[in-house]
Image (cartoon, coloured by chain):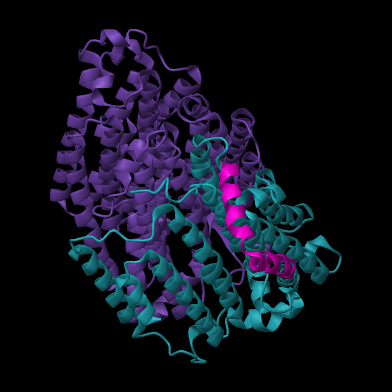
Amino acid sequence: MTVIGIGLIRMRNLFAVVMLSGIYSLLAAFLYVIMDAVDVAFTEAAVGAGIATVLMLATLALTGTQEKPSRHTNLLSIAIVTVTGAALVYGTLDMPEYGDPDAPIHHHVVPRYMNDSAHEVGPPNVVTSVLASYRGFDTLGEVTVIFTAAVGVIALIGRIRRRRSLNHDARLNERWADTMSSKPVLRVLTKLIIPLIMLFALYVQFHGDYGPGGGFQAGVIFASALILYGLIFGIDTARRAVPEWMTRLGLALGVLMYAGTGVAGLVMGGNFLNYSVLAHDHLHGQHWGIFTIELGVGITVAAAMVTIFFTFARLLPVDPNDEKRS
Amino acid sequence: MTSPHLPVLMVVLPLMSAPFCAVMRRGLPAWSLALVVTWTSFALALAVLTQVLDHGTIIYSIGDWAAPWGIEYRIDRIGAFMAVIVSGIGALSLAYSRRSIAHEIGVRRRPLFYTMFLLSLAGLLGISVTGDAFNLFVFLEISSLSSYVLISLASDRRALTAAYRYLIMGTIGATFYIIGVGLMYMMTGTLNLADLAARVPEVAGTRTILVALGFLTVGISLKLALFPLHTWLPNAYAFAPSVVTVFLASTATKVAIYVLLRILFTVFGKADVIHAQEIGDVLMVLALLAMFVASLVAIFQDNVKRLLAFSSLAQVGYMILGVSMATATGISAGIIHLFNHAIMKGALFMAVGCVFMRTGSVRVEAFAGLGRAMPVTMAAFVVGGLSLIGVPATVGFISKWTLIQAALETGAWPLAVLILLSSLLAIVYVWKVVEVAYFQPLPSYRGDVREAPLSMVLPMWFLAGCSIYFGIDAATTLGIARDAAAALLGNGP
């Protein structure tokens, strides 16, 4: 990872930089697996190595792939970065050793999560219990962050599109179809693989209680199926399958499902986000609560990823040569 | 209104209305929904404040999971006071926004503007009332992300660069904060602020905690635009839509200062921190620098919004100066100035927004002759300006009086002199605008300039009126600030 980090800084070709950062994320995911944080690893692999790379490649298509060389080196920035790095290293000196069973982190809140979550919340996957129930309000906040980001993209970039010629989208789609029609293998394979990806996404969505997974990962995987469709068959074609109003509604719906579940708990006599009161048996209540909020997370995340990708992709010039930026 | 759920509803209501606004196609329904919601939040915040003043700290466990396993809202005086400031300014600027936004933002983006506004409000409120360090981070992200978008929605292209700069600096600040929280979690095993306060003294001597404190302080200082980490602020305020400047200038940096108080005093207060004293010294020097450098720069600005933005940096200096003394009076001076500055800067930026609507410019020249053409607006500007200087019978006087008292109490009379000297600089930059407005004739090509619409004048004068009212009768606000300061120092109710 260090080698890749240095490579990232030295590299001038942005295409290579994006690829390297994808690899970096994948390595980070391996690191998380080694630390037994499979859920985090899953997210890192799906988001960091997957979607983020695709989005950055789409951006590169807009901006060009060479970094402008800057002549002067900024000494102040180097100094700040060095001091920050040194402070971090200095801070690690008194850290408990990795894997030390006496570290404070294992003795305060964690024991209850590990021992009691099964009969307090239910799911065998403790991570799900913590994220969705014990600290469910944070997760609601995270979903709202994703919602904010996607709506922000619509608000800021959605407007540039309208300035372009009206048939820009159609022309872009045509050119795309032309290029892709000469690659039948890709087209057939994509058609075969997309249902599988979607099925896998649903599995990840509904199996999050038992194994690693949940709404975040499932949403990203589901979105990647739609993005793949868009890449191969044209943005406009994909947009006809998933129109703009649908993703916008999905964005809102997911957040509302989550917060609505919280309000339901409040109406049924508990505090906000108390799922136990949703059914007669508290485990059933927790089960239904987590099921609904995870679905909300999945919907918002998938809608957000699709929105961001398609909003950017529509900015692509029809012919790379006639609108090349200087 | 004594339902136990008020604290959480105050935050969740704007948060849940945002998605509704996002699917609307037109501005008016979105504005109406947002108006109802922000005023309800304001009413809830007032109810919560009364409840806290009468019965003490409110604790609300979200999901009925007791802290530190779950997340709790723990609202004491200062938290409730912040919530009232944020939601009050939010409600007033939303009332003000309809005409201003209709003038500055295109039809199709208006519902999205209100979506972002509600999210920003929910984020800032969430920070004010939470008792959990990580939950604070999440809501900080909501509020920051939505403010970047709000700023870049301006029709001025320069707003995009300003917002981008804010995004980079803000993200670095948030990252520093979360690194700090991560280190603290590693050493204590908890994220709950009250629980952290109890467990930090045990490990206070370790280098990891010291570094954590450093990261937290620097990260938050970036967010509150402490000199020299302020570079994102002037352009962000200058080029943002008028309402956004009003809202962010009166709330965002204030909430960041509140977070700093929480970390320095609630979390690290009981720890044996010799280092906190050193942090106090550093903060004091930076605060003094901010007061003088920013005021001097403000004098040379031609853009009135930028001028007021630099003035805000100087005012942040006053607040931090109070905090850095770490005495009860000093902290209460900082807290009372949070409130006072919010209302006076709100009124000033609203006045500038009115001028922008009628003349299309916010440069000093554009104010020529407005003393006659827009008398109501300019009168509000003068009230705000006088308050900024610290003239008696305005809130600015109360702030400076308390601050000077605090300086004299600690025997630091040079500080008191410096506070007075910096007020002279404020006279210069306020006079610069007032002179042009009242002593220069209205240019003939601006003959048709009229007074701003009532829906903008009313909120503006409400704030201007508050800055006179609370300047004459400061007993309530000073009382809250004193009790809050005592509570932060651990010897209050």
Residue B177 versus residue B332 in the image, above or below = below
Q: Viewer-proximal residue, A309 or A192?
A: A192
Q: Viewer-proximal residue, B124 or A300?
A: A300
* In the image: residue B233, left or right of residue B80: left
Give the total of numbered labels: 0
Q: Viewer-proximal residue, B397 or A130?
A: A130
Q: Position of residue B318 (x, y in %)?
A: 27, 46
Q: Position of residue B161 (x, y in %)?
A: 35, 45
* In the image: residue B1, left or right of residue B263: right
Is A186 one of the magenta-colored residues? yes
- Quadrant housing residue A24: bottom left
* In the image: residue A104, left or right of residue A75: right
Question: What's the colour of chain A in the image?
Answer: cyan
Asked if one can make out residue B381 in the rendered structure from this viewpoint, the answer is: yes
Q: Position of residue B62 (x, y in %)?
A: 64, 61
Residue B313 versus residue B353 in the image, above or below = below
Asked if one can make out residue B410 in the rendered structure from this viewpoint, the answer is: no
Please give the range of residues in magenta. A169-196
The residue depicted at 35 percent of the width and 42 percent of the height is B236
Which chain did the renderer colour purple? B
The residue depicted at 29 percent of the width and 10 percent of the height is B445
